[in-house]
Amino acid sequence: MKIARIAKYSVMALILGAMAPGRVTAQSTRNHAASSKVQQLTTAQGALLQAVRESTARFKDVSVAEAEGYSLLFGCVTGPDSGAMGLHYVNMALVGSGGVDATKPQIIIYEPQPDGHLQLIGADFLVLADQWDKAHPGQGAPQLMGQLYHYFESPNRFGLPPFYTLHVWAWKPNPKGAFVNWHPNVSCAAFSGQAP
C-alpha cells in the first residue's frame, strides 16, 4: 500500500510546513517563559490554535499519544540555522485517511527536555497531494479553518510524492508565526537518541 511505502519518510516531509503570520494575540516564548514580543493573529487563526490545543491537550502525556497510534519517527528534527521542530510522533492511519480535521492531527510534535520528559509543543497536518487532489478535483490546496496548507512538489529532497503540510505551534508559541516551518526556540539538545 502507498501509505506503508511512505511511512519511513512521512515525518521528514514535515520539516517543510505552512506559512503565514497574521492578527488575536500569541505571546512568543523562550524556555517556556513569556517575552515581550507579540504575534498578531486573525480571529480565524486564533480559533485554529485554540481548536488544536483543545484536541491535543490529552497528548501532554506522550503515552496517551502512543496508545492512540502515534509513534516516533526519525528522532529529533533540527535545522541548519532555523531552530528545530522537535520529535514527530506520526499516526500513519491518519496520514492514510487524507483527512483535514483540526481535531485529528496526523503528527504530534514534542520537544525533549533536560529532565528526560517530552514537552508537547504543536501538531502537524499532512495530506498526500494526489490523494487530496483526487478527492477534491479543482479545489487546490487543503485549508484548515481558513489556514492554507503549503504544497511541496516532487521530486523533493525526501523522495516523496507531492504533499501538503501545515504546522500549528499550538503549545509553544513561535515568534516567527504560528504556522511556519521551523521554531527558533525549540532545541533537540536534550534528545538522547531513538531506540532502533
Image (tube, rainbow, N blue to C red):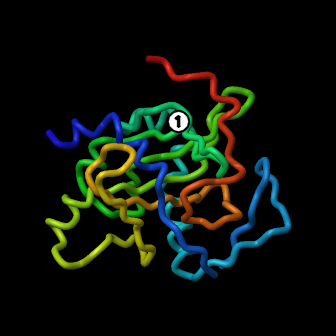
Residue at 22% of width from left, 42% of height from top?
3
Question: SS at mark 1?
Answer: helix
State which quarter of the image contains the N terminus: top left
Q: Is residue 2 above or below residue 149?
A: above
The answer to whether 117 appears left or right of 44 in the picture is right
Residue ranking furthest to the right: 36
The answer to whether 107 appears left or right of 137 in the picture is right
Residue 110: image quadrant is top right
Residue at 48% of width from left, 18% of height from top?
195
- Give x and y (percent) for residue 181: 54, 57
State which quarter of the image contains the C terminus: top left
Please rate how many residues cluster around mark 1, counting C-alpha atoms within 10 Å: few if below 14, some from 14 to 19, many from 20.
many
Q: Which residue is mark 1?
A: 62
- Give x and y (percent) for residue 176: 67, 65
Residue 159: image quadrant is top left
Residue 190: image quadrant is top right
- Give x and y (percent) for residue 185: 72, 50
Along the line of sight, which residue is nearer the eye, 86 or 171?
A: 86
Along the line of sight, which residue is nearer the eye, 5 or 145?
A: 5
The amino acid marked with disc number 1 is Val
Residue at 58% of width from left, 46% of height from top?
85
Residue at 33% of width from left, 34% of height from top?
8
Disc tally is 1
Along the line of sight, which residue is nearer the eye, 123 or 6?
A: 6
Residue ranking furthest to the top: 196
